[in-house]
Image: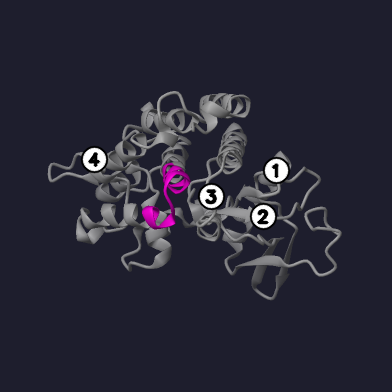
Amino acid sequence: MPSSLNRNDPEPYVAVKEVANDEAFEQEKANLELTQSLKHEHLIKLIATCQKGPVCYFIFPWADGGDLRDFWKANDSKERTQEVVLWSLRQMLGIVSAINALHGQNTRHGDIKPQNILHFLRAHDDATMDSRGRLILADVGVSKIHREITSMRQDPTNCQQSTVTYEAPEAQLDQREGKAKARSRRYDMWSLGCMFLEFTVWLVFDYSTIRSFRKSRRARDDPKDAFGSFFVQTPDNVIQIHSAVIEAIGHLRSQPLCGVNTALADLILLIEDDLLQVDAEKRMEAPKLLEKLERITRKAEQSSDYLYPT
């Protein structure tokens, strides 16, 4: 039995991804082989590949907790205890560590969003598992293949909306210029900032507030680009942070859990100053982000007042 399956489960479920294009299959396979070589506990494990006729398949462990949005919804009514906040910080740190590992191999993910963060309730490897499970970064392979396709579609499908929402501003610049430029690893930093801001909104408020936050971004967007992006383009073609994002950050800072000298206040500052920067060159690179987030997490582990002020 592959090590990625739970040996104690007599009937383990798996997730199967179908790829009908040989070139796409080979490219994704190469990306996933690189991922497997990193042996990172927050990167998805590939169990096997197989082929039936012209169609190729990738087999992964089944995420029994769904994705990050499923986690937010399933745990929405539960109290935001110290343990929940600390678990969340540790999982964010794990995701950043996984991104740092990818970037260290000169590889970007390119499609970071809550739907690509899977929630595993049971371990599928030899690493220890927190009682709340573990968040794992998925879709490392297909992101590069489908990146331009999903962002350029004219039909407002669910897939497009979720992808465009977390796109960095340079993607819109490329679209405006009709070019498909190579994107740097700092592209991932913007997407992380968007996702971590939503995570913080959930920690401080609830999932309905995340939905309201999205609606407020869509309501003030140009109708033809109404995907809830975290930035807007002015009539003068200047791209800037969406006013709803600025308001959300201000609202978070007014809450006791995000008061001065708290973990979430420092996380929000990190998101605002180092990740959600329109100019990609001003975004923090993964190694430095990992260092700063680890400092926040370790301090939160040592100080309950910093983690969860009462």
Residue holding disc 4: 239
Q: Image point 61% across, 26% down: which residue?
A: 298
Image x and y of residue 97, in percent: 61, 35
Q: Is residue 82 left or right of residue 122?
A: left
- Relative to 152, say whether 106 is above or below: above
Judged left or right of residue 167, residue 6 is right
Residue with the mark numbered 2: 120
Residue pointed to by mark 3 = 79
Q: Residues within 10 Å of mark 1 (few under 14, many from 20)?
A: many
Q: Amino acid at mark 4?
A: Ile
Callout in the foreground (2, 4): 2
Is 200 magenta? The answer is yes
> Residues at badges 1 and 4 in contact (C-beta under 8 Å)?
no
Q: Secondary structure at mark 1?
A: loop
Can you see residue 243? yes
Q: Is residue 6 placed above or below 309 in the rendered structure?
A: below
Q: Which residues are magenta?
A: 197-210
Is residue 100 shown above or below 227? above
Q: Which residue is mark 1?
A: 41
Q: Is residue 14 magenta?
A: no
How far apart, in angstroms, are the residues tagged by discs 4 and 3? 38 Å
Question: Residue 156: where, in percent of width, then height?
Answer: 33, 67
